[in-house]
Image (tube, grey):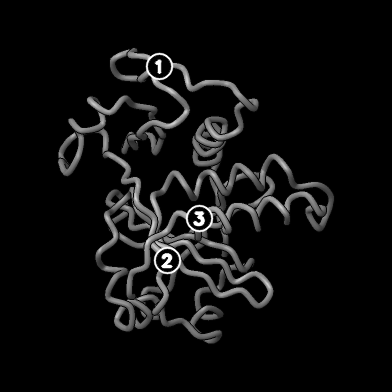
Amino acid sequence: MPTTSGSFARTRLATLRQFVRKPGEQAQVCELCAQPIGRTHSHLLELEKRRLVCACQACSILFAGDTRRPYRRIPRDVYRLGDFRMDDPDWESLLIPINLAFFVYSSAANKMIAQYPSPGGVMESSVDLEYWDAIAQRNPILRQLEPDVEALLLNRINDTRQYFRVPIDRCFELVGIIRTTWHGLSGGEQVWKKIDSFFEDLTAQAGERGA
């Protein structure tokens, strides 16, 4: 069953605030060295708190590829997985309550974690490892995801079947969109337009990679 804890929710809500600045508002400074940075900048993941940190290019390079440090550099590249193999029974076996989710390997938990956006922020759902391993065997790229900072993002809304390999901050960006624009029981017209726009932009930015 989907679960979320108080501390987990507070951390995620703090993360989402980074993606809901007012239009035109500039990102402040690097959170490590205090150098000014613009809206387009690198992110680090603070592993212990699962918190995004805004960083200048110089500081972000310090944490690239070193798993022993407290921060992990979040990659920038987005890939569309055109050959990803997942049929409807595969998806149903994962027991995700909505048709939008992302999967990231947690080094702390030593397992794959499924998460999905909601009007209240990020929700987490347990993954049956037997079913997940069957999916991973047909899609070797899942074993190439960088732990903690890269995710498989799935969009199966209506008849859509889109699969992306993305930096984890793009998943948080999507969650922020839903959290700040959802209204009523169905979300309202605006939120669905925003979701469509997000995936249109993601597709335009993405390179193609086989699964």
Work out whether 69 lies above or below 1: above
Provide residue 203's location: percent of width, then percent of height.
50, 60
Residue to which mark 3 is pinned: 202
Give the residue type at disc 3.
Leu
Residue at 56% across, 80% down = 92
Label 3 or label 1, whichever lies nearer to me, is 3
Answer with mark 3 or mark 1, whichever residue precedes in sequence.
1
Give the residue type at disc 2.
Arg
Determine which quarter of the picture holds residue 103.
bottom left
Position of 63 compared to 22: left or right?
A: left
Provide residue 116's location: percent of width, then percent of height.
56, 57
Give whichever of 110, 154 is nearer the camera.
154
Residue at 47% across, 28% down = 39
Work out whether 184 lies above or below 94: above
User: Which quarter of the figure is the N terminus placed in?
Assistant: bottom right
Determine which quarter of the picture holds residue 145.
bottom left
Residue to which mark 2 is pinned: 80
Q: Residues within 10 Å of mark 2 (few under 14, many from 20)?
A: many
Mark 3–mark 1 Cα distance, whole angstroms, equals: 26 Å
Give the residue type at disc 1.
Val
Work out whether 110 lies above or below 172: below
Label 3 secondary element: helix
Determine which quarter of the picture holds residue 67.
top left
Mark 3–mark 2 Cα distance, whole angstroms, equals: 9 Å
Position of 11 compared to 160: left or right?
A: left
Residue to which mark 1 is pinned: 29
